[in-house]
Image (cartoon, grey):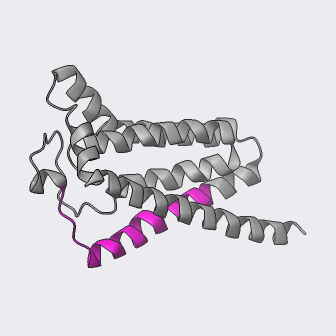
Amino acid sequence: MLDTQLFHLLNGLAGQSPTIDAIIVFCASYLAYILIAVFAVFLIFFVSARREQIELLVVAFIATAVARGVITEAVRLFYHRPRPFLTLPAHKLIDDTAWSFPSGHATFFFALSTAVYLYDKKWGTGFFIATVLITVGRVAAGVHYPSDILGGALIGIGVAYLTYRIARRITTKTAD
């Protein structure tokens, strides 16, 4: 199966050297905190219009909360996919106890990246690159299958886009 083959390819990077393991763990666990800090810096210093700052903050908050906190958890109520390190021979660099599908990290950070991208393409592209590093790191660390990432990405992107469209409708009506 392609999903398992891709998992083994990426997870095969783990356990090769302490340096590579440290990079994987950094991407899978710590880069997320940096990306949140970068979002705050971007919002405060690089979004000039106050109205756009507030709109982006609201869109990002609602999109990440709904995608990660509502949809991901609803899927996990009905679909219980164990983590790959529990079912396959794998290098486990970090631990996680929740169900694997969809990836909560992928859902949250793809929603955030999409929100940023819809307001600023250049910054959004950087956010997507960081999100890919985070999520590939989660696969390499042994806690997700690639399809978990794909599922989370689709949920995050879809919810962020819909949230953005609704926000634009509301702000267009209020501006008139």
Query: Is 75 in front, or is 44?
Result: 75
Query: Is 111 in front, or is 83?
Result: 83
- Left or right: 60 as drawn, with respect to 134: right
| The quarter of the displayed image where residue 76 is located | bottom left
Q: Which residues are magenta?
A: 57-83
Q: Where's residue 9, x and y in %?
A: 25, 38
Location of the N terminus by quadrant is bottom left
Q: Is residue 169 above or below residue 114?
A: below
| The quarter of the displayed image where residue 25 is located | top left
Query: Is 76 in front, or is 148?
Result: 148
Q: Where's residue 129, x and y in %?
A: 50, 37
Query: Is 160 in front, or is 146?
Result: 146
Q: Is residue 141 above or below residue 18?
A: below
| The quarter of the displayed image where residue 108 is located | bottom left
Q: Is residue 134 above or below residue 83?
A: above
In the rendered structure, does residue 77 fall within the stretch colored magenta?
A: yes
The residue shown at (11%, 57%) is: 87
| Magenta: main secondary structure | helix
Q: Is residue 161 above or below residue 4?
A: below
